[in-house]
Image: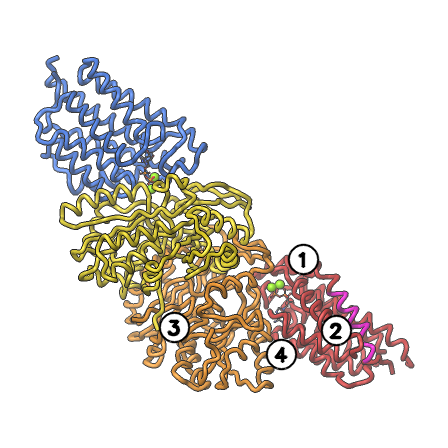
Chain colours: A orange, B yellow, C red, D blue
Amino acid sequence: MQRIINDPDNVVEDMLKGYVKNHSDLVSSTDNPRVLKYKSAPIDGKVGIVTGGGSGHKPAFIGYIGKNMVDAVAVGEVFSSPTAKAFLDAFKAADAGKGVACLYGNYAGDNMNVKMAIQMAKSEGIEVKTVVANDDVASAPKTEREKRRGVAGEVLMWKIGGAKAVQGGSLDEVINAAQKAINNTRSIGIGLTSCTIPAVGKPNFEIPEGKMEVGIGHHGEPGIEVTDLKSADEMAKLMVNKIIADLPFIENDEIAVLLSGLGATPAMELYILYKEIPDLLKDKGISIYKSYIGDYFTSLDMMGATLTFMKLDEELKDLLDMRANSMGFKEFGE
Amino acid sequence: MQRIINDPDNVVEDMLKGYVKNHSDLVSSTDNPRVLKYKSAPIDGKVGIVTGGGSGHKPAFIGYIGKNMVDAVAVGEVFSSPTAKAFLDAFKAADAGKGVACLYGNYAGDNMNVKMAIQMAKSEGIEVKTVVANDDVASAPKTEREKRRGVAGEVLMWKIGGAKAVQGGSLDEVINAAQKAINNTRSIGIGLTSCTIPAVGKPNFEIPEGKMEVGIGHHGEPGIEVTDLKSADEMAKLMVNKIIADLPFIENDEIAVLLSGLGATPAMELYILYKEIPDLLKDKGISIYKSYIGDYFTSLDMMGATLTFMKLDEELKDLLDMRANSMGFKEFGE
Amino acid sequence: MSYFLNKQGEIIIRNLIDTIIKNKEYLSEIDGAIGDGDHGINLNKGFTKFKNNKFNPEDDFSISLEKLGSVLMMEIGGSMGPLYGNFFMKMSQEIKGKEKIDKKTFGKMLNEGVEAIQILGNASLGDKTILDTLIPAQKAFKEAINNKKKFSEALKGLKEAAERGKNSTKEMVAKVGRASRLGERSRGVLDAGATSCNLILQSMADSIIPLLKEFDTN
Amino acid sequence: MSYFLNKQGEIIIRNLIDTIIKNKEYLSEIDGAIGDGDHGINLNKGFTKFKNNKFNPEDDFSISLEKLGSVLMMEIGGSMGPLYGNFFMKMSQEIKGKEKIDKKTFGKMLNEGVEAIQILGNASLGDKTILDTLIPAQKAFKEAINNKKKFSEALKGLKEAAERGKNSTKEMVAKVGRASRLGERSRGVLDAGATSCNLILQSMADSIIPLLKEFDTN
Ligand SMILES: Nc1ncnc2c1ncn2[C@@H]1O[C@H](COP(=O)(O)OP(=O)(O)O)[C@@H](O)[C@H]1O
Ligand SMILES: Nc1ncnc2c1ncn2[C@@H]1O[C@H](COP(=O)(O)OP(=O)(O)O)[C@@H](O)[C@H]1O
Ligand SMILES: [Mg+2]
Ligand SMILES: [Mg+2]
Ligand SMILES: [Mg+2]
Ligand SMILES: [Mg+2]
């Protein structure tokens, strides 16, 4: 395992220390070492935006703390849900009395810990509502959408929810916007290699040389099929087709595209993968309103990518246009 | 080789296509398929900023095309210098009559091709002056600084030179600012794995499991020594010490820090590596004015990092503060 | 009618803590085969935190279980934190304020604990989880008391069923959690959670049985 | 005094192009051992571009060399583009407008070409590069004409020296370029650039020698 770490059991602590030191203009630590918050949170009159999850997905989750995005994040061990207490403390750090929208992914541990945290928050007088992202089309059939995992579509959910909150939306309005965002969002991943949890020290699973796994999850959850490694153009086609068939996305739709590397993918290859996507969409009469390419939601040192489409309406476009400033989502102003 | 590509001989073409499609708000293609330019270049009354180099270093080089940074870039094959014609055409794309500052790295091929291109530009009436980055302390002794390679310090050179040009600096003023930036900048890299040029299909060289190469270059140029893989804290110490001894950086210096992954390094590990750096500097009485962590200058799928310090004075701080908007360097405005 | 006293909780809790700490490596080893090798570490972290910061020998069984559950639930994270955390907390609630714990009460404790895990974790018998130890054990205990078996006999039945349940996971294919990634390849080794659950039930039963003797009038 | 005519360039250039295209795989294979395996591809790309877009059989030797050099220099990039590009361009300049090319003129062409590569590439004899073919070949030619050898004899001397020079790279440790990464491990195989340079010189000499006969009065 060729990695830049100290004690493999302390990677999360070490990472958080480095993160806070570098991003002190954006984030502050809290009394709970596993909770980071936006330095200006809680923001008067604004619904708090909270998320959280296991570590190893950088920029997710702490990388989306910042202006117009997420107010507080509960941080778990690598690939392991944060504690209920971390979620609770994140709620507290984000709440300005207008309630908290907890926008997170659909993982067993997160579901349980958020549930517990909400019960406790309630008894402390904090109102928390949730949106559970389930954008990964490969993780369950469409008829069982509630079982699907949240993947990179979460980033767009945070951006939309965060913007709605900044616009002064009530808790219900924020929840509705974030829910609409995720309802309109579909993703799929392709994995080319495994990844190694530092404390484990050996690859989490195996993808044979010359093969790829279509529909792989962010922790290596099994995909739909393992096939021969295809060309970038064929991968693009396969991913686009799986996604658009699912919602479905149809003629005249306007969408946001997010193409994320899984951690060890050179940026060059993300652009190669992107090359055919605009044309494939054009062929179906679908137009791209905005596209984002980079490492937005990763899986340690996994090689591969996820592709995400979000169908836009006027409200979502308006919210997407609100510039965010976080480590993972930085938008230049004039 | 588990990679997202089509024909390995066409990775550069494919990447450029995807890049232009995604960043049409920032860049445009030119008549020369191996030259990209800022969509607003040439900018009236502004010195043009040009760079160029082999591909595989994303965001470098095209990722720094944008507002307040680079105007045009000559694009080479993977790890191979662009043609003289590409440099020439980049000069043409950037020149608004005030001359062109060509700010590039100190690689044999680049030196030759830039030299040829300048001769040709001269005969077409375009004035070009150069700054050759040589920030890599590991690539030659201090007494032979002119032999040293340019590495991630180039990013800061572009930012400073780009800002000076936007401030209305003359060609000489831009050149002087960029030269000052690089004179004040020192870098060192540590490599943990090799990297694979897609068209070659096998690793470029080898670093044995459990070892690391201190001082490795951006294309795998040999470093100072191959040692046992150290902890992140020890790596940080080693890198900091090598850099500060070289300029040297001394008490009361204010510096900019740039910590870049080499392509396959999970962001988490860059923050782990960063953790000790502020304290190590504090111990020497050196303070950090700004720090940047991420993939700024990479080497395909190499695992490892480069650390760069730039000593600041009031002029450099002022120039560094000018917000840039490019794929690789995006700064949020209020 | 046999019973043990709520205030006799200390020894049951102490043995439970010891069992987990002693089996830390063993549990992680099992988890390593088809999981990520941290099950022992995770549980050890929780039980040690409880032991060092919350455990009070004066506390009755109910209060200790609640504190243990709360530490697991609040501070361990992952799936095991809330699952075992809820398990112990729900068992605790069943005996809150009660002086004596008889076989009927203990049966209810088990029911509450198992139900909590099922509701929270949404897994089923045969998914290769802690439930494959827990559900057979709970069932065996219930049947024993339905058949008017003594408390200690019922606990022995629980022990046997838990052990059998744990062993049954060896031939199962994991359906939930990390190991489900492996599909067919998850067959052939024990499930880590089922193993820790068996250790927990064995330890509890072994601690309770000697306590029962003192009051055994049957 | 023997010479060949500038306007006889077509055959020399044709043979040169054929040589590079024919040896594309071979050169890449050699580069693969200690480089990145693209030397043949790089040269083939340049020579093919020249052949398809710029080569005019009517052009004299000087003009063809200039066009070839310019395509290599402008459109190939890397280090080989400017190095071989300058090499051919500088050779061309020496005979621009001349009708006849005698041994003295050819010697000057070589000098100009070698100097261009040295100035641009900054490598020395023994660094395991094209210079290890080129410099001995140039020297042998010079000595031969200093010793009043015939043009064709001098070219034969050049051929032998080039071949020897190329072979000498086998035992060298690379000091510049990609292969220098390998240090001692670069020993034991030929240098790709030295090999291509040998092919170029052999082809040129073999093309020129038969041309000389026609005018040979010596
Ligand atoms: N939904 C669930 N219900 C019951 N038990 C579960 C569930 N998910 C996982 N488990 C149990 O958790 C065990 C793994 O625990 P542990 O290793 O501590 O967590 P992790 O898988 O996060 O590393 C598995 O062996 C399985 O018995
Ligand atoms: N500075 C130099 N001077 C002379 N020849 C050089 C120099 N640098 C490299 N070479 C030659 O270039 C050859 C490699 O060429 P090629 O494979 O086409 O380029 P690259 O190394 O960029 O892939 C080497 O075998 C060596 O002979
Ligand atoms: Mg775990
Ligand atoms: Mg585990
Ligand atoms: Mg090459
Ligand atoms: Mg080569």
Identify which residue, A64 or A137, lies in the foreground. Answer: A64
Alpha-carbon span between mark 4 and mark 3: 38 Å
Asked if marks 1 and 4 fall on the same chain, the answer is yes
Residue drawn at the location 25% of the way across and 39% of the way down: D82
Is residue B189 shown above or below A315?
Answer: above
* Residue at left offset 16%, top offset 21%: D104
Q: Is residue B215 left or right of residue A200?
A: left
Q: CA distance from mark 1 to mark 4?
A: 28 Å
Quick check: B222 left or right of C2?
left
Q: Which residue is mark 2?
A: C55
Mark 3 highlights which residue? A324
Cα separation between marks 2 and 4: 28 Å
Q: Which residues are magenta?
A: C7-20
Circle 1 sits on which residue? C29
Mark 2, other Cα within 10 Å: few <14 / some 14–19 / many ≥20? many
Q: Identify the element where label 2 is drawn.
A: loop
Tell me the quadrant of ligand 6: top left
> Is there any visible trace of residue B211 in the rendered image?
yes
Q: Identify the amino acid type marked 4.
A: Ile
Q: Residue B316 versus residue A284: which sits nearer the camera?
A: B316
